[in-house]
Structure formats: structure tokens, C-alpha cells
């Protein structure tokens, strides 16, 4: 990508409306723009980062046995009446009417829809287990939408739903999903912690959250540093003493990036969705559901990974892997520079952001630091004349001068 063809500019002033660092940096770096409270447009760099997060999630969901589906955002109210959530969900549910005055919700979550779908396709225990997942927009009329895309009213979630013939199988899938989540957050480069959790409006009695520790977090996590027990304070409101080993607890604020629930018959029983078990008896499905805040992950990553100059993306989700910064007049057309770009292109197609603008070097450095590309290749006369280039590693600030032909290998 050539910066001279990119209309999105960085902002040098501090955006007044941003209260947390991720929101401020996403606005300044040109990742998102606000349309209404809790409603954002994603600019091209944010979409590139999102797609990388999604593809890691897809790989792990597929290898855990999941199959991807797309589910309606428009959900008829009668489905929600069946589970009692048309009332219970309260003002967070976006409600609307069609031209025939039929009531609908804009889906904040999809338990009702998927349970109804599965009742239409699965009749026998032989078709089980079934693990379906979706990566889609969800709508919640949050009481306090804030902090940019950390708490939107429209946001992207990966949700998965499991259907099993026995409680034992449902619990095995639950455990498999916990492991898959650990791998996803590890691959994304997020420092996270799994904690015991309350199941809130989704329901069920076994539940864990995946938390990213951050000052801006709206959740509080209590942890025992001795036996590693950890819980959301919502689940253990009175805990002063570790309930497992009795040691003192530490409490910290955190951002919830994932949440898994064992549901049992919570939805299948009221919706009367059953299958024929091996004895030929009609029994309700044993269910689980598993969410990840895909768009929230971008902001949570920035909360955890930034400095006073800007964002520091982990390689796995950086919008571009490398910024290539030719300095001074004519440098962006030099043969050595073009051939370096070609070799980068053949190793990582589309992953170089080539800042060919005719602007001061200082501005190129500032923008590359702000946008947080993991590597910068700096090409000034002094080095290029000798066949060299300089590489800066964004996270550590380390700089190395080396022959141009050796640069691509260094960036792997
Ligand atoms: P929160 O406690 O932050 O309101 P939640 O517990 O209501 O989240 P879940 O129903 O567990 O959310 O949804 C699964 C995941 O979706 C959450 O773990 C979170 O990462 C993400 N998520 C939930 N609400 C929002 C939101 N308003 N904006 C962005 N992501 C969200
Ligand atoms: Mg919520
Ligand atoms: Mg929560
Ligand atoms: Mg939750």
C-alpha cells in the first residue's frame, strides 16, 4: 500500500471526546470514526486488523470442530417470548416493528435463533454433537456506550453454540472451547487471564470469562497469587479470602474479551427443542455458548500495548507488518528500494505500508510510531548508498543497520 494513495490522515491534535488511550489512539491513527454514541465506522487499517483477528479465531474454531454459520440480526419477538427474555432483557434490547406491526429485536445474542434453527435440522442423537459459530454484528442498547469500540451499541462478536446428546459431552466441548480460547488469545499476543464468572442475562451455572488486565477495564477481578484461583467480583462479591487456599486476594480492573457458558437445558427446555436419544426418547439438547468480543479485542490490545508515541501492534494483528520509509527526494523511486519492496511483497503479500509521501522524515516516523506497525524499514541516502538500510523494531525501539538484501529475513 502506498501512503500517497491513502486518503486517511493521522490526527496530531488530541481528540477531545476520548477518555481512554485506545479510543484516543484509534481516532488519531485513523482507525475509526464515530457516527453516533457507541456506533463507529471502521477505516481500512482497522478492517485489516479485524480480519487478522477473525482469521485466527476461525482457524481455532474450525480445529475445535466448529462450523461457521450466518444468523439473522432481525429476530421475531415470539422467539424471545418463549424463553422469557423479551421481558427479562430489558432496555438493552433494541426493539422495532415491521410495517405489519410485528415486533422484532436486533439480535444482542443468538441463543433463541440458533436453538430454533437446530430444532429444524437435528432429529436424532446420531446427528450430534453440533458446534456452530458466527462472526457477526450484535446490537445492544448499552446504558453507557463509551470508550470508543470497547463498549459499542453495535459491535462484532464471535459467538459459538454447542448442542450435545449428553451433559458429559457438553462439558467436554466446554473444556475444549476453554482451551481454544487460551490458544486464540496467546496467538493474538494478549496477556489474559481466565476467571470464574457470573452468567448474567445469558444464564446457566458454569461460566468463565477471559480477561485482559487494564486500568480502563469496567470489570473487577479478584485473584489469589498463591493458588491461582481467580474470579470476577460479580461471581464472588464477598470474597476477602481465597475460597480455595485462604490466602489474601488481589483485586484489579480488567476488560472482558471472551465469555463461555455451560447452558444445559436453559434454552432447549422452554423452547421445547428435543431430539431422539439412543433409547428412542424425546429429550432436550444440552447446550453451551461461547462469545469473543472481536472488535473489543482491537481496543483491549491497544490498552495493553502502547507507549507515549502510539500503538504497538502484536505482529499477529498489525494492519501492516512493516512500514517502509524512504527519506528524501527521489528515494522512493530508487532501484534498491523498489527491489526491497518486491522481496517483502513476495514473502508477505500486501503487508508493507510504503510511505512514499514527499514530507519531512520526522512526520513519517511519527505516523509509523502512532499507527504501531511492528517493523519500520528506514531508508536514507547515507545507508542506501552503501547498500544498507535501517530496521527499527517498534516494541523495543531497537535499531539495526544491515544490508538491504538481509532485511526481509530479519522481519520474519
Ligand atoms: P460486558 O460485561 O462488557 O457488558 P457482557 O458480559 O455483557 O459484556 P457477553 O454477553 O458475555 O458480554 O458477550 C460476549 C463478549 O462480547 C464479551 O465477552 C465482550 O468481549 C463482547 N461485548 C459485549 N458487549 C460489548 C459491547 N457493548 N461492545 C463491544 N464488545 C462487547
Ligand atoms: Mg453487557
Ligand atoms: Mg460481562
Ligand atoms: Mg459476559
Image (cartoon, grey):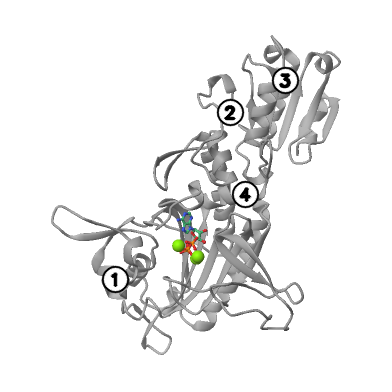
Marks 1 and 4 sit apart, C-alpha to C-alpha, by 35 Å
**In this view, the mark in front (3 or 4):** 4
Residue lying at the far front in this picture: please name it. Answer: 16
Asked which secondary structure carries label 2, the reply is loop
Quadrant where the N terminus is found in the figure: top right
* Label 4: how many Cα within 10 Å (few below 14, some 14–19, many 20+): many
Q: CB under 8 Å between callouts 4 and 2? A: no
Quarter of the image where one finds residue 125: bottom left
Marks 4 and 2 sit apart, C-alpha to C-alpha, by 19 Å
Q: Is residue 188 above or below residue 129?
A: above
Asked which secondary structure carries label 4, the reply is helix
Q: Nearer the viewer, residue 11 or 83?
A: 11
Would residue 48 be visible to someone looking at this image? no
**Which badge, 1 or 2, comes first in the chain's sequence?**
2
**Which badge, 3 or 1, comes first in the chain's sequence?**
1
The residue indicated by pointer 3 is: 339
Q: Is residue 133 above or below residue 239?
A: above
Residue at 67%, 47% in the rendered image = 305
Quarter of the image where one finds residue 246: bottom right
Would residue 129 be visible to someone looking at this image? yes
The residue indicated by pointer 1 is: 87
The residue indicated by pointer 2 is: 12
Marks 3 and 1 sit apart, C-alpha to C-alpha, by 63 Å
Q: CB under 8 Å between callouts 1 and 4? A: no
Q: Position of residue 201 (x, y in %)?
A: 41, 71
**In this view, the mark in front (2 or 3):** 2
Q: Is residue 91 above or below residue 402?
A: below
Q: Position of residue 391 (x, y in %)?
A: 79, 30
Q: CB under 8 Å between callouts 2 and 3? A: no
Amino acid at each position: 500500500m502506498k501512503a500517497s494513495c491513502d486518503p486517511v490522515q493521522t490526527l496530531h491534535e488530541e481528540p477531545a471526546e476520548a477518555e481512554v488511550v485506545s479510543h484516543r489512539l484509534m481516532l488519531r491513527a485513523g482507525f475509526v470514526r464515530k457516527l453516533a454514541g457507541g456506533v463507529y465506522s471502521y477505516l481500512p487499517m482497522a478492517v485489516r486488523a479485524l480480519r487478522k483477528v477473525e482469521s485466527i479465531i476461525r482457524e481455532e474454531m474450525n480445529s475445535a470442530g466448529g462450523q461457521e454459520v450466518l444468523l439473522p440480526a432481525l429476530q421475531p419477538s415470539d422467539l424471545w417470548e418463549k424463553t422469557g427474555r423479551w421481558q427479562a432483557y430489558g432496555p438493552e434490547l433494541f426493539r422495532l416493528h415491521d410495517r405489519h406491526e410485528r415486533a422484532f429485536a436486533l439480535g444482542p445474542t443468538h441463543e433463541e435463533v440458533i436453538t430454533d434453527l437446530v430444532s429444524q435440522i437435528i432429529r436424532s442423537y446420531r446427528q450430534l454433537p453440533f458446534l456452530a459459530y458466527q462472526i457477526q454484528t450484535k446490537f445492544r442498547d448499552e446504558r453507557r456506550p463509551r470508550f470508543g469500540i470497547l463498549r459499542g451499541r453495535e459491535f462484532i462478536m464471535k459467538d459459538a453454540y454447542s448442542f450435545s446428546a449428553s451433559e458429559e459431552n457438553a462439558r467436554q466441548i466446554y473444556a475444549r472451547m476453554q482451551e481454544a480460547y487460551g490458544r486464540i488469545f496467546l496467538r493474538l499476543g494478549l496477556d489474559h487471564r481466565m476467571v470464574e464468572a457470573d452468567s448474567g442475562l445469558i444464564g446457566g451455572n458454569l461460566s468463565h470469562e477471559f480477561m485482559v488486565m487494564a486500568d480502563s477495564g469496567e470489570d473487577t477481578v479478584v485473584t489469589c497469587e498463591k493458588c491461582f484461583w481467580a474470579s470476577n467480583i460479580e461471581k464472588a462479591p464477598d470474597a476477602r479470602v481465597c475460597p480455595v487456599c485462604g490466602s489474601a486476594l488481589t483485586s484489579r480492573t480488567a476488560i472482558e474479551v471472551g465469555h463461555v457458558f455451560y447452558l444445559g437445558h436453559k434454552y432447549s427446555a422452554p423452547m421445547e427443542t428435543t431430539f431422539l436419544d439412543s433409547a428412542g426418547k424425546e429429550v432436550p439438547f444440552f447446550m453451551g455458548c461461547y462469545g469473543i468480543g472481536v472488535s473489543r479485542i482491537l481496543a483491549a490490545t491497544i490498552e495493553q500495548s502502547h507507549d507515549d508515541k502510539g500503538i504497538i501492534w502484536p505482529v499477529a494483528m498489525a494492519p501492516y507488518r512493516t512500514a517502509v520509509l524512504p527519506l528524501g527526494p527521489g528515494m522512493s523511486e530508487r532501484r534498491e528500494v523498489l527491489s526491497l519492496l518486491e522481496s517483502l511483497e513476495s514473502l508477505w503479500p500486501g503487508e508493507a505500508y510504503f510511505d512514499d509521501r514527499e514530507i519531512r522524515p520526522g512526520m513519517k516516523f511519527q505516523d509509523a510510531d502512532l499507527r504501531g506497525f511492528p517493523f519500520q524499514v528506514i531508508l536514507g541516502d547515507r545507508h542506501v548508498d552503501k547498500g544498507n538500510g535501517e530496521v527499527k523494531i517498534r516494541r523495543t525501539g531497537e535499531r539495526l543497520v544491515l544490508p538491504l538484501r538481509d532485511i526481509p529475513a530479519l522481519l520474519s
